[in-house]
Amino acid sequence: MNYYVMTLFPEMIEQGMHTSITGRAIEKGLLSLKTINIRDYSVTGNGRIDDYPYGGGAGMVMQAEPVYRAYESLVCQAEQKALRLIYLTPQGRVFDQSMAQEFACEENLAFLCGHYEGVDERVLEAIVTDYVSIGDYVLTGGELPAMVMMDAISRMVPGVLSNSDSGVSESFSDGLLEYPQYSRPEIWRGCQVPPVLLSGHHGNVDRWRHEQSLLRTLRNRPDLLEHMQLDKADRKFLRKLLEAGADSGLSEKEVSVLQNILENS
């Protein structure tokens, strides 16, 4: 996977991506990262790339020409005319795991990090292929969202994670939140590791983990369950929870949500 990032703060991207898992993957050649400083393509030659918005209003707007010149440089570096370029904006599709898997199939992936009040619409229409948001809030720039996306996408690239299974057994990989994890010691401050995890019975462990994922998703993200295709075993487990009611630790709201899910599954 080759990443190209058009930004006003290349050092921010470089420092963030050259650490931890992504940093090691870059060292191994599994990922590559090139940053393009948009200020280098200023039309005035002094690094200024913004101007006042037509029609008035607060703030400044990134000009079209510096962004387009940076894009032309990016295309030359990538040696690819049809380049998938993501613009980070609250107006885009909300990023999720399925999008990470989709983007991970690309050989080259480019990001445009906006600032100020945004980017001149004309250049966005000319070069952007995907408008993506990482959530319904506003940040000071697109660098952090770009790094969030690259981190999530990189985990889908073969070889980046040391354990080949870890990328497919985490939250959202099967539409559910991840099950609880435990490590040594067996008893910590009076709290015991669930006995099933000590049983050595892999089938029971797998089923327990899946049921815990169902329970955790019900409690924290019930909206995910509403769109899932539940199998017979899933429905049996959820019905047992519903029958136990308060004894299962469910709140009245969770019981109501569970009733609705089972009625419509």
Image (tube, rainbow, N blue to C red):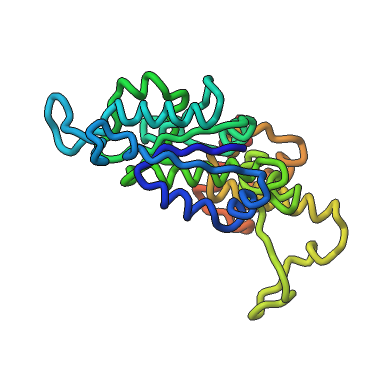
In the image, taking residue 229 as reference, residue 140 lies left or right, namely left
* Image point (66%, 75%), residue name: 191
Q: Residue furthest right?
A: 201
Residue nearest the viewer, comparing 194 with 71: 71
In the image, taking residue 14 as reference, residue 142 lies left or right, namely left
* Image point (72%, 48%), residue name: 210
- Image quadrant in which you'd find residue 36: top left
Q: Above or below — where is 181 with respect to 109? A: below
- Residue 250 visible, this orientation: yes
Q: Residue furthest bottom?
A: 189
The picture places residue 149, in percent across and down from the top left corner, at 51, 42
Figure label count: 0
The picture places residue 201, in percent across and down from the top left corner, at 87, 58
Q: Residue furthest left?
A: 56
* Image point (30%, 31%), residue name: 119
- Image quadrant in which you'd find residue 195: bottom right
Position of the C terminus by quadrant: top right
Q: Residue furthest front?
A: 45
Residue nearest the viewer, comparing 38 with 235: 38
